[in-house]
Image (cartoon, rainbow, N blue to C red):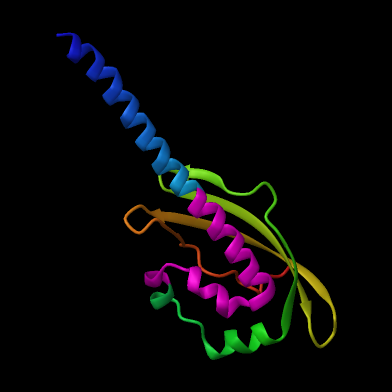
Amino acid sequence: MRMRRIAGPVLLSAMLLLSGCATDKRGDALTHTMIAYANAVRWDGFEAAQQFVDPKVRDAHPITDLDRERYKQVQVSDYDDGNGPIPAGENEVRQIVQISLTNVHTQAVRTIVDHQLWRYDPVKNHWWLESGIPDITQQN
């Protein structure tokens, strides 16, 4: 009988620790992914950032030749993630990012707003960008 009294709290504690580990694992993956994505956009360009987009979304909305030509005309001069990601569901976060683009020909700078939706795949411990790469044709 005494073993049952001890086993209950021990089992509950173990479950809480395991769920905490899963949350930490998911949070660590999110932090790593957000930093890597921002670096890809900022330094490697939008085509490199495409690797963060969910493969299903990528297949449904491939980068066109016109998009590639547009990407060549701008350089990201600032990536401001504001307050960072905000939980939007059990395995979702949203983030609003302001991206400053410099036209490489005219040096004119403009800012676009990127409304990001990220989903977590618990099986692969991986965050995918569901909203796709930002639309750089936005007008202020």
Q: Is residue 58 left or right of residue 113?
A: left
Tell me if residue 104 comes above or below residue 40 in the rendering: below
Q: Residue at x 19, y 9 (%)?
A: 2
Viewer-nearest residue: 121 or 56? 121
Tell me if residue 84 comes above or below residue 67 in the rendering: above
- The x and y percentages for residue 31 are 56, 53
Tell me if residue 72 comes above or below residue 25 in the rendering: below
Q: Is residue 45 left or right of residue 123?
A: right
Q: Is residue 45 magenta?
A: yes
Q: Is residue 57 left or right of residue 111?
A: left
- The x and y percentages for residue 108 are 84, 77
Viewer-nearest residue: 116 or 124? 124
Q: Is residue 57 left or right of residue 5?
A: right
Identify the residue at the far top of this view: 1
Tell me if residue 28 comes above or below residue 134 in the rendering: above
Q: Residue at x 79, y 85 (%)?
A: 104
Q: Residue at x 78, y 70 (%)?
A: 110
Identify the residue at the far right of this view: 107
- The x and y percentages for residue 121 are 37, 56
Q: Residue at x 39, y 77 (%)?
A: 59
Counting every numbered tag in the picture gives 0
Viewer-nearest residue: 40 or 114? 40
Question: On the rendered image, what quadrant is the C terminus found in?
Answer: bottom right
Q: Is residue 33 magenta?
A: yes
- The x and y percentages for residue 119 are 43, 55
Magenta range: 28-57
Question: On the rendered image, what quadrant is the N terminus found in?
Answer: top left
Give the main secondary structure, helix, strand or loop, of the magenta stretch.
helix
**Which quadrant holds residue 56?**
bottom left
Identify the residue at the far left of this view: 1
